[in-house]
Image (cartoon, rainbow, N blue to C red):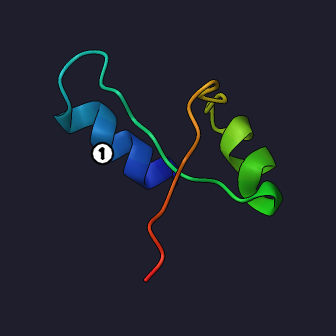
Amino acid sequence: MEVLIGRIDEAAPPEPYITLLADPPGQSLYRSLGFVDSAPSLGMRLPR
């Protein structure tokens, strides 16, 4: 993740909007990397 975030920092325009979906077991990892909750937004999917 740190390498990917570094690549985004190098290539993206200033202040990019970066999102991801995190299941509860992974949330602490993403928070430790600087991600914050996107409330009130909620990830959704269309099962098929």
- Amino acid type of the residue that numbered disc 1 sits on in the rendered structure: Arg
- Residue 46 sits above or below residue 14 on the image: below
How many neighbours does mark 1 have within 10 angstroms: few (below 14), some (14-19), or many (20 or more)?
few
Asked if residue 30 lies left or right of residue 3, the reply is right
- Residue 15 sits above or below residue 22 on the image: above
Residue on which the image places disc 1:
7
- Residue 40 sits above or below residue 24 on the image: above
Q: Residue at x 30, y 45 (%)?
A: 7
- Mark 1 element type: helix
Q: Residue at x 35, y 27 (%)?
A: 17
Asked if residue 11 lies left or right of residue 18, the reply is left
Which of 39 and 18 lies nearest the eye of the viewer? 39
**Residue placed furthest toward the bottom:** 48
Q: Position of residue 13 (x, y in %)?
A: 17, 23
Q: Position of residue 10 (x, y in %)?
A: 24, 34
Q: Residue at x 74, y 58 (%)?
A: 26
Count of numbered circles in the view: 1
